[in-house]
Amino acid sequence: MCRGRLARILLNRPCVPGRNGVFSRKLTAKPYPEWQEAFIDRHRLPPDYLDSAHIWLNPLAEGLLLHQKGAGHPVLVGINGSQGSGKSTACDYLCKQMEFDGGVRVAVLSLDDFYLTRSQREELAQTIHPLFATRGVPGTHDMTLLGTTLDGLLARSGGGTVSIPRFDKALDDRRPPVAWDRVAAGVDLVLLEGWCLGARPQSGEALAMPVNALELDEDSDGRWRGYVNEVIRRDFLPLYRRVDQWVMLRAPSFECIYRWRLEQEEKLAARTAGGASRIMSSEQVARFVQFYQRLTEHCLTELPPRVHHLFNLDEQRRITAAEHRKRPSP
């Protein structure tokens, strides 16, 4: 970490703070540890991902380890990133790096795994608004389940195990409990990632103006987005008070997110080998991302000053710059 209020690092001149605060180019040593080579194979990543990870993610892992050591208790790290931004891959890398380098126990949670079941969302669609049948926005998550899961993972006493739910996007439904992961309670760090983590409630003036055709045609009275806003106020703000450190992977714009989401769907189709019935077509993806547009654009504009670690991405998801703050804006 560099000294001062803000550290800026440019991709075309990757550098790290050296003596007397002077920045210098960092050349990573090769070969990489075996776990990193296996990581590349498992995620089907290009080899240069490790070069980027050593420049950008390793210092972040080191900073998070120092924060946890200084805190003296288990810490929760909130990681925001739009759909397709690479946040799940980055979280997995950070987890492995901190376990390897720091000897700590790390758990990774995805907000996506806490979606309500399909039947629960269908009930919301009938009682609140038809758009709640589609997963994604606040209001379609089981925040009680997320809270109890965090309680178990962050328990200082440890002991026992914690069940981690899993959501099957190919089937658009939560997996049965027998298929959930189980981890030992009382970890040192929890990485919680989600596309809308950190989003704050919007003003009535902002809610009044539709941002796309979906809102204009199917939420003309604003009832759906108004309920989403209330859920953020009621359920998400208390969650944010538990977060010790905030990280954001900032996409260049909402326009590139459609392409990223389409790539995700194509990878999902390849993994399921045609066996799942709910893989989306390009037209369905175009509609699907409209559910996410309002809060994604809200986060891209409003969230960056409030995070401890901000990473700017280009259209190929490569990190191009980073900013680190000890005390972000409230």
Image (cartoon, grey):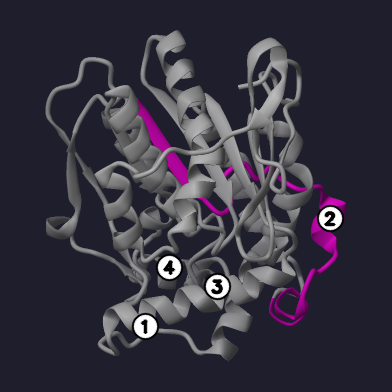
205 is within the stretch colored magenta: yes
Residue 174 figure quarter: bottom left
Task: Tell me if residue 235 can be seen.
Answer: no
Q: What's under tag 3, amino acid-wise?
A: Arg
Q: Measuring from the top left, give residue 129's x and y in whole percent.
A: 58, 70
For the residues bearing labels 3 and 1, Cβ distance under 8 angstroms: no
**Quarter of the image where the N terminus is located:** top right
Residue bearing the label numbered 2:
206
Q: Measuring from the top left, give residue 165's x and y in whole percent.
A: 27, 52
Q: In the drawing, what numbered circle is on residue 261?
A: 3
Look at the image and give the residue range highlighted in magenta. Answer: 189-218
Residue bearing the label numbered 1:
269
Q: What's under tag 1, amino acid-wise?
A: Ala
Q: Measuring from the top left, give residue 146's x and y in whole percent.
A: 37, 42
Q: Which of pointers 3 and 4 lies earlier in the amino acid sequence?
A: 4
Q: Choose between 79 and 56: the one closer to the eye.
A: 56
Q: Which of pointers 4 and 2 lies earlier in the amino acid sequence?
A: 4
What secondary structure is found at the residue carrying circle 3?
helix
Q: CA gap, disc 3 to disc 1? A: 12 Å
279 is within the stretch colored magenta: no
